[in-house]
Image: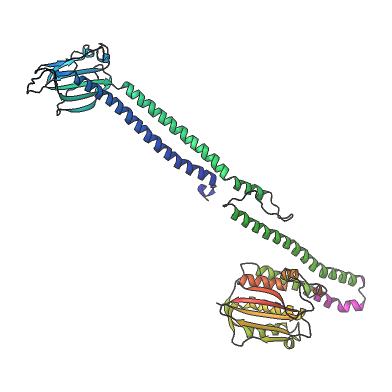
Amino acid sequence: MSQQQNKSHSIKRKLVNNISAVLSVILFTIFLTVDLSVDTWVEDQFNQSLTNKANYLKTLVEDDNNVVEFDFAGEFMSEYEAADATEFYQLWHGSDVFERSDSLALYENANLPFLKMPINESKIIDYELPNGRDGRALISHFVAQKDDRNPTHSAVFNTMTLAIAAPTAELNKVLIIIDVVFILTCVLGVFGVRYLVTRIVNKGLHPLHNLNDQIKLLDITGVAQTIESDFKVEEIEPIRNELNKFITVNQQLYSNEKRLTSDIAHELKTPIAELISLSEVAIRYPDDKRISDTYTSDVLNISQRMKTIVNNLLLLQRSNSSTMKLDIKAITLNNLVNQTINELTFKHPTIKSRLRSNISEDLTLMADEFSLNTILCNLIDNALFYGLPEDPIRLSAVNNTKNITVCVSNKIHKPLSHDQLTAIFDPLYQLDSSRTNNQRHGLGLSIVQSLCNLNGLTITANNTKDTTLTFILTLPTK
């Protein structure tokens, strides 16, 4: 057997893993969406800051009667004023450099990127700053605005190009912090989800663990026990009910097994005690002709009784086993009844005069011949023994559309009680009137019940009118 087959499966582990995986994927998706949204928003804010600065600088460029002026005040935008500043701007008039920020003074040969593009268009690009740091540049192409104070304007438009650049170190630092927070949140979220799911699953499986604890305390060898629950769980109740049925059946089987063992010992004890007593008397009085003349026949009779008990017990065990092979074939019921009568004639010489059969000559059914013959033989034998000698035994059969019903009836002294009707099919159960008869062992009706169960038949015993006991055998029509 492979290692995978030997590995036990866990409902709890599977539930925890599956639910944790699903929730973790959902959390990861949410956190990733939030992270990307925040990253995009931060970058948009950075780009918007560049755009706002560019728009402000463009408002400082004026066309005063075809003379371009740039009115920049360093006190309002000090980030471009200091020589060691990290932000830069550069302005072109046409393709000629018009203005440079003081922060570019240390980098005389460095120019910000210049791109040709349509008027009123802007573009943001990643750019390495003159100081060697990573940054981002915005290039915008625009027309210098006319001075509103001059009533006469030239028809010539002065096109300008503005480039501003800023470092992205702070932006990258913020993005890294956001990503680290995202990763830590994801990891903590996964562990948190798994912890919560484990707690929830453990709580949800508590009724199952409680059921298992109660099963451990069961002992079918003791008093009758069932599994009880303080609160009912919809999914557990069917299992608990079926387990209680199983426990009840096994307790009954165990009780029957104990009784059967005791009854078998009792049944075999009597003939064994007779054999021992007979042998002891024969040994003690070897010359007594009265003992020696009947010794062998007595031993034979006792041995035959023991053989009958053993054979019936073996037949009972065989009928309870699924290994017994059935030979289903068409059987004429009346012929099988006549065969049964012939088999019982040696035991009941008056059977032909006492048995009144009301079965059609052509009634045919599908059944296992051995099983049906054994069932009829035991039912008729039981009726002949328990029935009143002066009253007939009645045998009838009715063919319905769904089944065939065979009834065996005999009159008795008084109706059987409900408990007697219930126990009559138990192994080695005997009515008081049969316990004094050495030929009755209480196995015949148990064999009938077992063979009926094996063949899918039903057998019931009922009290009918005029103190009549009727056994009803029902065979399905095939």
Regarding residue 120, the answer to whether it shows in the image is yes
User: Image point 78% across, 65% down: which residue?
Assistant: 265
Judge from the rendering whether residue 342 lies leftward or rightward of residue 136; answer left or right.
Answer: right
Where residue 42 sits in the image (x, y, percent)?
Answer: 33, 27
| Dominant secondary structure, magenta | helix
181 in relation to 467, above or below: above
Judge from the rendering whether residue 346 lies leftward or rightward of residue 367; answer left or right.
Answer: right
The foreground one among 302 and 351 is 351
Q: How many marks?
A: 0
258 in relation to 162, above or below: below
Judge from the rendering whether residue 259 lies leftward or rightward of residue 138; answer left or right.
Answer: right
Q: Quadrant of residue 449?
A: bottom right
The foreground one among 197 and 379 is 197
3 in relation to 272, above or below: above
The foreground one among 321 and 201 is 201
Where residue 454 sits in the image (x, y, percent)?
Answer: 62, 70
| Colouring method of the image | rainbow
User: Image point 27% across, 26% down: which residue?
Assistant: 48
Magenta highlight range: 284-302
Specify whether residue 297 is painted magenta: yes
Q: Quadrant of the C terminus?
A: bottom right
Q: Quadrant of residue 128?
A: top left
319 in relation to 27, above or below: below
Regarding residue 10, the answer to whether it shows in the image is no
Specify whether residue 171 is painted magenta: no
Where residue 241 sits in the image (x, y, percent)?
Answer: 62, 56
Where residue 88 sits in the image (x, y, percent)?
Answer: 23, 17
